[in-house]
Every structure is written in structure tokens, then in C-alpha cells.
Amino acid sequence: MDHLRLEAEIGGYRAADQKLEALEATYEDLATMLVCAADEVALLDSSTRAWAQAFYALAFQPGDRILTARAEYASNYLAYLHVAERTGAVIDVVPDDETGQLSVAALESMIDERVRLVSVTHVPSNGGLVNPAEEIGQVTAAAGIPFLLDACQSAGQMVLDVDRLGVDMLAGNGRKWLRGPRGTGFLYVRRSLCERLHPPMIDLHSAEWVEPERYELCAGARRFEMWESSVACRLGLGRAVRYALELGMDTIETAVTTRAEAVREGLAGVEGVTVRDLGRRRCGIVSFTIDGHSGADVQERLARAGVTVTTGRASSTLLDMSRRQLPSVVRASPHYFNDDGDLDRLVTGVEDVSGGRL
Ligand SMILES: *Cc1c(COP(=O)(O)O)cnc(C)c1O
């Protein structure tokens, strides 16, 4: 907000000139958070945009296979469908194991020379599942296949280390667990892959027009950016990342998962309530349903009691939701700033909705 005021007072260019260092620090702090180099980070205006810049940079041929998971996010799957339609690439969904996470054994058995990309959502938008990114990364590294991870719901709530995860490309945003401003996203691209990728669109920021008939792409991940951006939002994203780093990502992860477990325990004892979280490892998202109530209805009733939850609709994670025959789930995302009183109010509110008192 200070920066927007400064832009109003002295103009956008001069205001940005005064913040060059802080803007660079945003890249560096994201690199610290992801354990990569600052030139492997690009700033975009959303996670979807960041993800798409990487995905659409890959050249698919007819018959190329894209392997993904059941809990895939709608915008990603729509892009697979879009590209499959245009190129003749094929989408193959890796089945879940008995816990509901992507089956690493099934993934391994599906790898062949036609697999061009493994693309998975780390934490889906509709539940506490954490897909086994590290094990997936081991499979893709051994096979020499690029691995794209949608880390939108994991960034800011858990430790992310791109080498340990074995990812080649990773997208996230500022507005979710990082608690930053809307309109911010970031993309990590491994240096060795980046130099071989051509962004789906370029401008005078991502490339230089060096001769009338020739351009040169800029070095590093910034080739995936375009020139214009909200400086205020980028500064806000940097501040949010720094704030998380100061608290410590491992401290945040423990605080978040402990609270989510407490909520699950509380909800498990409420009649008419089913906790819907899948997977071996569970994170800070708690998903549940109440018999006889739609997600939107629960969301509205809980809001009356001062409890903020959101609704996961089937169309956001269609493969998973239709397989489980769930039209919607309620999603609670306790963060480190929620205290025991907040968690109690949530569980009591759910009891009241289920018991017909709210
Ligand atoms: C919210 C979400 C996105 C989209 O993030 P934007 O920054 O709004 O584009 C992508 N993937 C998952 C899993 C999400 O939950």
C-alpha cells in the first residue's frame, strides 16, 4: 500500500527505481524458500499463469503421453485437454494407491519412451492429501522425464526443497498459505531445463530484439515473465515470503499440521460428519461433509457463527470428486495464527449445523 501511494506521488517508474533492491530480494527469498537459485525463479501474476508458462513451453507431438494424478486441479487438466486436442498428445491418469495418494508403483509401471511429462498437484484444493512428490521425483529423474509440480496449496504451509522433491518445474502463489497479496504467482524452472525451453509467448522483457530478424531469449527463468507487473504486489509477495522464512517453514509446517489433526479429531466425533481427507501424509487442509447439507450451505451457516471455511466443488477436482461421488466438500484450513478457541468454535459450529441448531 505504501508503494501504491508512492506511485501516485512520484510516478510508477521513479517509484520502481527506488525499490529495485527489494524487488530483487523477492526472487532471492523465494529461492531461499524453494532451495534453488534466484535465476531459477520467475514472478507471474498467479499460480495458474506460472504453471501455464511452463506447461505450454513443452512441445508435444502426437502420441506423447502426459501422466497426471486423480486429484488434479481443474485448470491444469483443462490445459492437458486443450493441448491434447491441439497436438494429439494423450493424457493418462495414474491410479491412486489404497490410501488415496498417487500410486508410485503404478506410475513406475506406466513409464515408457512416449511419456513426455509427469505433472501432478502436490496438495489438491479439495483435501488434506499430500501427493508423494519426492518418490515421484525419483521415478522421473531415473527416467529423464520432466516433472512439473503444482505447489499452490503446499507453498507456505510446508517445507519445499526442489532438489529433494526432484521437481524440474514448480508453480505457486502468494495469496494462499503464504498470506500475501492476490495477483501474485511464482515459477521455479531448473536451470538445465530452462535453457532448452521456449516460453509460449515473449515480449521485450523475456527476449531482446537484437537484429531486425533475430531475437535472443533472456537467460534464466525470467524468460517466462513479461514486462509489465504490479510492483506493489511483487513487494507484498516478497514481504510474505520473508515473513514465512522468519517464522521458519518447518515451524509453520508443524503448527499447521498439528492444528489440522486436532480439527480432524474433533470432527470425527461429530454425528453426521465425515472427514474426507485422503492419503498417507496429511497437511493443513481439512475436508469434510455433513449429511444432508451441501458444502455451500455449511459455509454459509458457519459464517453466521464467525467461522470462515470454503467449499470445494466437484468441478475443481472432477476426477477425484466424481469417483468418490462427492458434489462438494467443506474445506477448513487452520493456519498458525488460529488458536485453540478458533478450532473449538469450528468444531462446535459443525456440531450445531449437524444438530440443526445453526
Ligand atoms: C488455487 C489453486 C491454483 C490456482 O492459483 P491461482 O494463483 O489462483 O492461479 C492452482 N492449483 C491449485 C491446486 C490451487 O488450489
Image (cartoon, grey):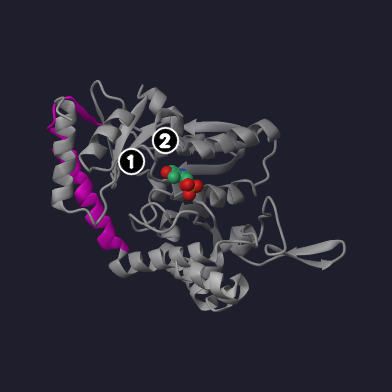
Can residue 139 be seen here?
no
Picture disc at residue 71:
2
> In the image, residue 119 lies at what x, y percent?
51, 43
The residue at the point 20 percent across, 51 percent down is 258
Q: Secondary structure at mark 2?
A: loop
The residue drawn where x is 47% and y is 67% is: 235
The relative height of residue 315 versus residue 7 in the rendered view (above or below) is above
**CB under 8 Å between callouts 1 and 2?**
yes
Q: Which residues are magenta?
A: 249-276
Where 96 sits versus 158, above or below?
above
Residue shown at 34%/64% (left/top)? 244
Quarter holding residue 205: bottom right
Q: Which x, y percent locates residue 107?
A: 46, 37
The answer to whether residue 5 is magenta is no
Q: Position of residue 211 (x, y in %)?
A: 85, 67
Give, as a three-letter code, the residue at label 2: Ala
Callout 1 amino acid: Leu
Q: Is residue 68 left or right of residue 105?
A: right
Residue 275 numbered tag: none
Do we see residue 218 in this rendering?
A: yes
Which one is earlier in the sequence, the residue at label 1 or at label 2? 2
In the depicted view, which residue is nearer to us: 176 or 39? 176
At label 1, counting other C-alpha atoms closer than 10 Å, the crowd grade (few under 14, some 14-19, many 20 or more) is many
Give the numbered dot on residue 129.
Answer: 1
